[in-house]
């Protein structure tokens, strides 16, 4: 079992979300950066979609009550085990009573902690992903406790190597496809959209990232239509909103772009003030 001594700013249990329930208005949710979460699970030999703890901007403090293995990936929040710095992207042996904590963030924005066999928590609609109104908790709170498998079946692969893509923390190009309403943009609007840098505003969270610079807009709202994580909406005020994992299932703003899955992972590791550029594929 693991106990939450300090939940950090915004930490939650996430897997790969609730696929197949959008027709009922249920968001997909799930890990913001699927690459880093899957990496944390692969290193331990878990299924890539096993539930992990996702931490945003500041890390949690966790105490483990059983021997196991963990792995920390994603943003470098200076992880420590019993106050000793840990290496990212590596299987770490945990002994009963060990405390995992985090310090200063160095790169990225979201960190993932996997445990051998995955964290066990409330399952709703085939997913453990925390979401307000769906699960009993929105995020971790102090004194939360979660079970995990107590197993000695893990064989540490000392000679195995996994190539980690750290370039994702440095990339600013966000690859996207044309959205359903892209063709309604004027040539000038398209040129600005694809050739200008956009800054991430302070309105960014698991639901959406709003960009700071406006794109002059005269398009009419559309009939409410389906949206997905990665849909880029253009509001009447000219603000661009990139929908993320906890986004609604329908929307009435023109959908000018649709991000690639890998682009959502990259964006999930960006924070307020950082710049991105859209790259059409």
Image (tube, grey):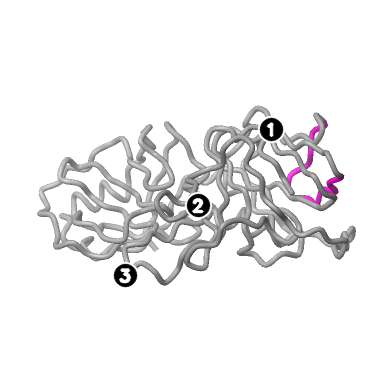
Check residue 23 in the rendering and tell me which mark sits there, or answer none.
Answer: 3
Residue that appears at 73% across and 56% down: 148
The numbered mark, 3 or 1, whose residue comes first in the sequence reads 3
* Residue drawn at point x = 83 percent, y = 46 percent: 94
Left or right of residue 210: residue 51: right
Q: Earlier in the sequence, mark 2 or mark 1?
A: 1
Depth-wise, is mark 2 or mark 1 nearer the camera? Answer: 2
- Magenta stretch, residue numbers: 84-95
**What residue would you read off at disc 2?**
130
Q: Position of residue 54 (x, y in %)?
A: 58, 46
Residue 53 percent coordinates (x, y): 62, 48
Q: Badge 3: few (under 14), some or many (20 or more) residues near its Cα, within 10 Å?
A: few
Residue sitting nearer the eye, 107 or 63: 63
- In the displayed structure image, the side of residue 218 where residue 61 appears, left or right: right
* Helix, strand or loop for disc 2: loop
| Residue depicted at x 45% and y 68% | 19
How far apart marks 2 and 1 lie (CA) works out to: 22 Å
**As drawn, is 146 to the left or to the right of 15?**
right
Q: Classify mark 1: helix, strand or loop.
A: loop
Question: Label 1 belongs to which residue?
Answer: 102
Q: Nearer the viewer, residue 2 or 230?
A: 2
Q: CA distance from mark 3 to mark 1?
A: 39 Å
Helix, strand or loop for disc 3: helix
């Amino acid at each position: 079992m693991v106990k939450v001594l300090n939940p950090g700013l915004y930490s939650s249990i996430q897997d790969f979300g609730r696929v197949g329930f959008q027709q009922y208005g249920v968001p997909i949710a799930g890990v913001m950066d699927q690459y880093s979460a899957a990496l944390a699970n692969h290193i331990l030999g878990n299924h890539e979609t096993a539930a992990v703890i996702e931490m945003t901007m500041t890390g949690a403090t966790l105490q483990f009550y059983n021997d196991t293995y963990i792995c920390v990936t994603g943003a470098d929040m200076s992880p420590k085990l019993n106050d000793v710095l840990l290496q990212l992207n590596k299987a770490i042996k945990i002994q009963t009573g060990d405390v995992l904590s985090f310090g200063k963030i160095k790169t990225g924005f979201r960190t993932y902690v996997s445990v051998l066999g995955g964290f066990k928590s409330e399952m709703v609609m085939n997913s453990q992903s925390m979401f307000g109104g769906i699960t009993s908790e929105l995020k971790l709170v102090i004194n939360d406790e979660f079970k995990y498998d107590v197993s000695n079946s893990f064989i540490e692969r000392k000679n195995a190597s996994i190539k980690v893509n750290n370039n994702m923390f440095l990339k600013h190009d966000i690859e996207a496809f044309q959205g359903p309403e892209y063709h309604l943009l004027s040539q000038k609007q398209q040129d600005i959209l694809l050739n200008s840098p956009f800054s991430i505003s302070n309105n960014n969270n698991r639901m959406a990232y709003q960009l700071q610079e406006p794109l002059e807009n005269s398009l009419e709202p559309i009939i409410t239509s389906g949206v997905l994580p990665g849909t880029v909406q253009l509001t009447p005020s000219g603000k661009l909103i990139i929908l993320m994992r906890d986004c609604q299932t329908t929307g009435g703003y023109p959908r000018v772009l649709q991000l690639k899955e890998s682009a959502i992972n990259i964006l999930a590791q960006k924070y307020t003030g950082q710049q991105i550029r859209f790259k059409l594929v």
